[in-house]
Image: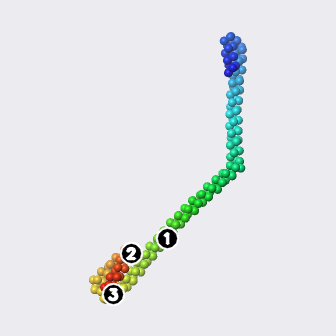
Amino acid sequence: MLLFVLGFVCLQFGLALLMGLFYLLASKVMLLALALLALLGVMTLFTAVCRELRGYFSRESSALRQLLSLQIRRQDVERLKFAKCRQLSYLTRFKRQRLLAADNRKQARELSDAIDHELQAAKSQLPTSRYKDLRKALRKYRKQADSAAMLALRRQLHVAD
């Protein structure tokens, strides 16, 4: 900047040759300063990148990344184990419900068959209308799979005896 000021002063005093020299020299110095500033910026950027790369690939940060990776993997395994346990519990509960329902149907069918045999045995002792009503009720309760109602019907059959 000082060279530009000197060139301006020379212009005021009418020294055109000296003014041209100072302006030429000032523009070259400004261009050199700008180039040095850009070079300084690039060097600063390069050193920062090198420092970050050295830090990234250092033993401590590598060990820390491996530790974090192992922790995340362990958490993933725990989550997977929990999900599999939940799924297994659900499937077991579902199978248990299916087996229970099948067993209930089988028990109701066997109870109905037993009551039917008892009803057949007591057929000669019961009036026809009462026998038909009891048969009809038994079919209805069997269709509904209502064991309590079938047992109540059985009690009625034995009370009627």
List x then y, in percent, for residue 10.
69, 13
Residue that badge 1 annotates: 95
Q: Which of marks 2 and 3 is nearer the N terminus?
A: 3
Q: Quadrant of the C terminus?
A: bottom left
Foreground residue, 15 or 153? 153
Badge 2: few (under 14), some or many (20 or more) residues near its Cα, within 10 Å?
Answer: many
| Alpha carbon separation for disc pair 1 and 2 | 20 Å
List x then y, in percent, for residue 11.
67, 13
Does residue 146 appear to the left or right of 85 in the view shown? left
**Disc 3 on helix, strand or loop?**
loop
List x then y, in percent, for residue 122.
33, 87
Q: Which amino acid does label 1 sit on?
A: Lys
Residue 145 bears which disc, if any? 2
- Up/down of 112 relative to 10, above or below: below
Q: Which amino acid does label 2 sit on?
A: Ala
| Alpha carbon separation for disc pair 1 and 3 | 40 Å
